[in-house]
Image: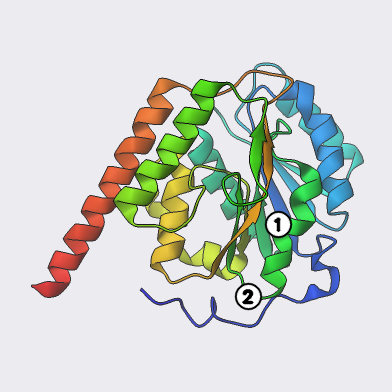
């Protein structure tokens, strides 16, 4: 598929974007009270003109209450409360829709709330949107990227997941399971969020796949991913299984579409 004219438009204006003007950072949370205040401050320090949207899934540890307290004192911070924990992908879809409802938002960033993604990398992540990128992937597996503090089994799961997805979907990107991304508004509006099925980390593969299929200009920038120092990981075996099934479904769907065009 080719990208639409909107996606192939001019680069986003550099004035202000580097400082976060027109950028909305979407931050899903579930039991991240220990991290939220510090990570919110670090994000807004890195992109002082950005909006920050906290999407909280009714965290029982009071993360949502803390987010409301922070938002009352910080006009750049907003909170979207969800009724229950339904998964990372569902939280991101709701957060993206909120961001796209803001007419001044030109770019949307997604990232983790536990400092696994370094807020200081945010200016580097959004910078390619000012030249020719529609989507920027923060990658652990390109030259200059890496992981710190991850146990061996997590490294193996991550690398195997990306290798599996790259092989099955014939994608060239080195880190398909990462969640540190910057989107041009027009591309995010164009991908099929309403048809997304993944509730877990398969959502990362799913959205990059759709962007690639639209012919989006996708760039990779190196990042260092650090294991969280507070709170508990949300990774489970069911999330891994779902991601595998998402990849298989996307390939079968592509095959079916190709056969349909030939009929």
Q: Position of residue 80 (x, y in %)?
A: 66, 40
Checking the image for residue 146, the label placed there is: none
On screen, residue 92 above or below 229: below
Q: Residue furthest right?
A: 73
Query: Which quadrant of the figure has residue 64?
Result: top right
Q: Quadrant of the N terminus?
A: bottom left
- Left or right relative to 27: residue 5: left
Q: Name the residue nearer the viewer: 76 or 122.
A: 122
Cβ–Cβ under 8 Å for marks 1 and 2 = no
Tell me if residue 20 can be seen: yes
Q: Quadrant of the C terminus?
A: bottom left
Residue at x-position 65% and y-position 57%:
108
Q: Name the residue nearer the viewer: 98 or 222.
A: 222
Q: Residue furthest front?
A: 143
Q: Position of residue 85 (x, y in %)?
A: 53, 27
Q: Residue furthest left?
A: 263
Residue at x-position 52% and y-position 25%:
154
Q: Position of residue 153 (x, y in %)?
A: 49, 22
Residue at x-position 47% and y-position 29%:
156
Tell me if residue 75 can be seen: no
Name the residue tied to disc 1: 125
Q: Earlier in the sequence, mark 1 or mark 2?
A: 1
Name the residue tied to disc 2: 132
On screen, residue 185 above or below 13: above
The local crowd at label 2, few if under 14, some if 14 to 19, many if 20 or more residues have their Cα within 10 Å, is some
Give SS at disc 2.
loop
Query: Which quadrant of the figure has residue 103?
Result: bottom right
The local crowd at label 1, few if under 14, some if 14 to 19, many if 20 or more residues have their Cα within 10 Å, is many
- Left or right relative to 53: residue 139: left
Q: Name the residue nearer the viewer: 123 or 93.
A: 123
- Left or right relative to 179: residue 87: left
Q: CA–CA distance between discs 1 and 2? A: 13 Å
């Amino acid at each position: 598929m080719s990208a639409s004219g909107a996606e192939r438009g001019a680069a986003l204006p550099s004035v202000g974007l580097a400082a976060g003007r027109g950028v909305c950072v979407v931050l899903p949370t579930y039991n991240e009270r220990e991290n939220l205040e510090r990570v919110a401050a670090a994000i807004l320090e890195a992109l002082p003109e950005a909006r920050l949207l906290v999407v909280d899934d009714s965290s029982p540890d009071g993360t949502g209450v803390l987010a409301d307290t922070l938002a009352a004192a910080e006009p750049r911070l907003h909170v979207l409360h969800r009724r229950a924990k339904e998964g990372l992908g569902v939280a991101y879809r709701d957060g993206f829709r909120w961001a796209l409802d803001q007419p001044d938002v030109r770019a949307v960033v997604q990232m983790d709330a536990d400092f696994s993604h370094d807020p200081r990398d945010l200016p580097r992540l959004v910078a390619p949107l000012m030249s020719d990128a529609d989507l920027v992937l923060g990658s652990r597996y390109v030259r200059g990227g890496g992981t710190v503090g991850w146990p061996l089994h997590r490294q193996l799961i991550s690398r195997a997941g990306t290798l599996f997805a790259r092989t099955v979907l014939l994608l060239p990107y080195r880190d398909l399971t990462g969640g540190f991304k910057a989107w041009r508004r027009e591309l995010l509006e164009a991908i099929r969020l309403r048809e997304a099925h993944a509730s877990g980390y398969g959502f990362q593969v799913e959205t990059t796949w759709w962007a690639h299929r639209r012919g989006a200009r996708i760039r990779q920038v190196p990042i260092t991913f650090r294991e969280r120092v507070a709170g508990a990981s949300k990774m489970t075996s069911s999330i891994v299984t779902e991601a595998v099934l998402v990849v298989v479904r996307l390939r079968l769907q592509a095959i079916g579409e190709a056969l349909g065009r030939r009929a």
